[in-house]
Image (tube, rainbow, N blue to C red):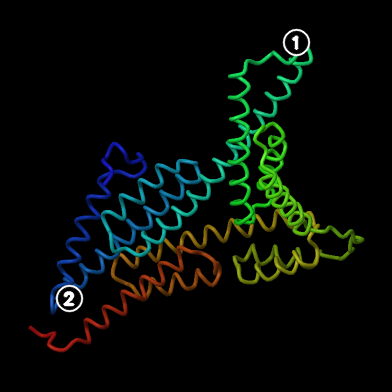
Amino acid sequence: MPTQQQLPEAFPAEALQQARRQSAELHRLRKLDTPTPAQQQQIKQLHSGLRQFEQNTIRTASRLEKQNDWHGAGQVLKAATGVLPDNQALHSAQQQFSQRRKLREEQVRMELAIHRGEQLLQDAEAYQRLRQLQGPSVMTWLELKNFQRQCGSSVQALQDHGQKALQREHYALAQRALKVARRLYNHDPQQDDEQRKAIDHDLALANHRLRHSAPRTVRRPPKKKDNKRHVAELQQALDAGDLQSARQHLSRLRQESPESPQLQPLQSQFQAQLDIRVENAIKRGNDLYSQGEIERAVTVWRDAKALDPGNAELTTNIARAEKLLENLRALSAEPGTRR
């Protein structure tokens, strides 16, 4: 497990130690055949504490990833899964993060290979100008061989990167890499005709995909519609805090008057109200959950999810709470609960 010095400051080691203690205590209580009401309440509180740790971990890792601190995000997830090895949400977050980091690393390495290839092309042009000035002996035999070797290696690397980009359907990046590879190919004395054909084939495929994937813009005369009524109804719903109606009016305005100058300000106003409403609902649900009011917490979260159906945090909270309610009902239904 990473040491305290290796973890980002935003993720203190005390949080790991607390989560480890909570997990151990929860494991002990789960082994009890007939937990008392006080112990059942303690189980709920431990669940709440570990769920909060899980959410804080994922949020911290996500924030670090957005700041391009990929190493820090990976260390946070690694440390958290080390403390809670059976936590499915943390394992899922770590797996998804690893996939994103792998793709990002491949992209960075590909951009680096393209940069190196472009630099070699610039060197080749400079050597050509020097030969025009001083004759063919401007480079020693060793310098020439070394440059040709670098060109050959760069061609192979760019070809490999281009093929991977084609498989991931990153056609623009593949096109860049293969274009540089094709130009460098002429500077490789050990020219392989099969390699040239393969590069040409992949480059043609990338060009074809880009042509057919480019959106076709069709110019249509602007539709002049009276959107004053939609704007007024939307503003009225926002002033009243009726976000369900506001969403409907906003969708209608977006469909019928996408160029309306009022659309963007109203959309921003709606999103701001929605963010505040959902954030308050999440906090309210968390408070109820911590107090053992699981069913009331689920109700609050479901009401918020109706306003923001795609909110991942609400979805996770509801699923976790429903699972806990199911476990508690199973414990209460077991025979021999009396002492």
Indicate which label's residue lies in the foreground, 1 or 2: 1
Question: Mark 1 is on which residue type?
Answer: Gln
Q: In the rendered structure, which amino acid carries the disc numbered 2? A: Pro
Residue located farthest toward the right when viewing the structure as drawn: 221
Name the residue tied to disc 2: 37
Residue occupying the far bottom of the picture: 335
Q: Position of residue 157 (x, y in %)?
A: 58, 41
Quarter of the figure with residue 297: bottom left
Q: Which residue is mark 1?
A: 134
Q: At 75% from the left edge and 20% from the top edge, which residue is drawn?
A: 128
Q: Residues within 10 Å of mark 1 (few under 14, many from 20)?
A: few
Farthest residue, direction left: 339
* Location of residue 35 in the rendering, given as x and y in whole percent from the top left corner: 15, 76
The quarter of the displayed image where residue 228 is located: bottom right
Badge 2, how many Cα within 10 Å: few under 14, some, many 20+?
A: few
89 or 235, which lies in front?
A: 89
Is residue 36 shown above or below 265?
below
Q: Is residue 232 above or below residue 77?
A: below
Along the viewing direction, whichever of 117 and 103 lies nearer the viewer = 117
- Residue 70 image position (x, y, % from top left): 45, 43
Q: What kind of element bears circle 2?
A: helix
**Alpha carbons under labels 1 and 2: distance apart:** 93 Å
Q: Is residue 300 left or right of residue 182?
A: left
Q: Position of residue 289 (x, y in %)?
A: 33, 67
Name which residue lies at 62% across and 18% down: 141
Image check: 91 left or right of 49? right
